[in-house]
Amino acid sequence: MTDARTTDSAPTAAARPATWPGLLLAVGCAAAAMGIRQLAPTVSPLLSAILLGAVLANLASLRGGLPGVLAPGLAVASRRLLRLGVVLLGLQLGIGEVLALGWPVVVGVVAIVGLTMAGTLGAGRLLGVGQDQSLLIASGFSICGAAAVAGVEGVLPRRRPEETAAAVALVVLFGTAMIAVMPALTGALGLDQHLAGIWVGGATHEVAQVVAAAGIIGPAALSSAVVVKLARVLLLAPVLVVISWQQRGAAAGEGRTLPPLVPLFVAGFAAMVAIRSLGVVPDQVLAVAQVVQSWLLAAAMFALGTSVHWQVVRRTGGRPVLLAAIATGIAIAIAGLVTWLASAA
């Protein structure tokens, strides 16, 4: 009797593939990406992680591909760890800090995000870039770089890891160029540090790039730039909710399973923002949470990177690159207008 029960339960246990090999690899390579960040502070660990994953996958393809035992854990990393990272991102934001900017700048930040997204999506249609690819690029360039790309990827029903990886690479490439462009531009126009910080924070893509660019200008620029940038990050939640609702409409029309009205990880992000705004979280906890959040997103990006193969990247073509350049130009122009209005207020 005991033997029969043991025999019957064996297939059930075997049907549950272990996730720890893939997760261990993803977390370990995320640690390597974080280490690269220590050596080169302007290099995004998310980009480093994606590149590590892509290089490993392409090298492994010469010998038949990555071992199948890694697949379950990499799948968990690319979805669940990604969403946990986005949730923890909310702890970086306090609503009070954003409101302290004043209503003209707050409204301007909403305009930067909304108009950059709309302009990028419109340009994507004109260029013939795929809808999902355009949406990933638009979100990354208008909101908060790779984290926004990851968040939007999490609410899309059709996952194309190569498009996510391309969007992250583009946002890091153009954002890194902004580290040199924005200080030169604000200096040429003779802006004071406060106004220069508003422009840098409103136009530059990644938080780390904002810190690098504004730090070149001065401490006052750095302070205002970071707050403006975090105000853009705050808009990640409503943007994700809107995209999720749009996906529900499309799914209903096609007879597919409806996604949730508000994805759970978006609600978690909003909850973390609320908790941070209450001021009840100690600074030490916030510091640890920031490191964990970066680690989780890096592990997710590594997992996504393992799905990117050279042939797929080569087929991406130049149109997404052109779209990224257009998105950058739109963000610079609208943020510049917001800065001018702030100077006149």
Image (spheres, helix red, strand yellow):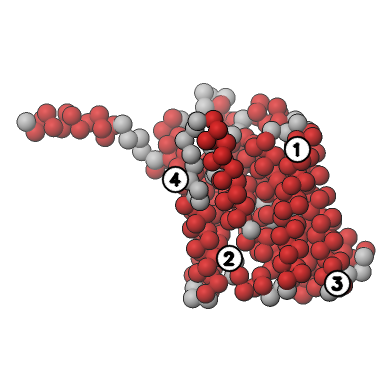
Crowd class of label 3 (few under 14; some 14 to 19; many from 20; radius 10 Å): few
Left or right of residue 258: residue 135: right
Q: Are marks 1 and 3 in contact (CB under 8 Å)?
A: no
Rounded to the nearest whole Å, what is the CA distance between mark 1 and mark 3?
A: 33 Å
User: Is the residue 182 above or below the residue 281 in the image?
Assistant: above
Marks 1/2: CA–CA distance: 31 Å
Is 69 on the left-hand or right-hand side of 293?
left
Inspect the image, locate mark 3, and give the three-letter code of the amino acid beneath it. Answer: Ser
Q: Position of residue 255 (x, y in %)?
A: 50, 30
- Residue 124: which disc? 1
Q: How many marks?
A: 4
104 relative to 248, above or below? below
Marks 4 and 3, the one that precedes in the sequence: 4
- State the residue in front, 144 or 309: 144
Mark 4 and mark 2: Cα distance apart in space: 27 Å
Residue drawn at x 53%, y 24% is: 63
Disc 1 residue type (three-letter): Gly
Alpha carbon separation for disc pair 2 and 3: 27 Å
Among numbered discs 1 and 4, the one appearing first in the sequence: 4
Residue 24's tag is 4
Question: Residue lying farthest left?
Answer: 1
Task: Name the quarter where the N terminus is drawn.
Answer: top left
Q: Residue at x 56, y 46 (%)?
A: 244
Residue 92 numbered mark, or none: 2
Circles 4 and 2: CB atoms closer than 8 Å = no
**Closer to the camera, 306 or 62?**
306
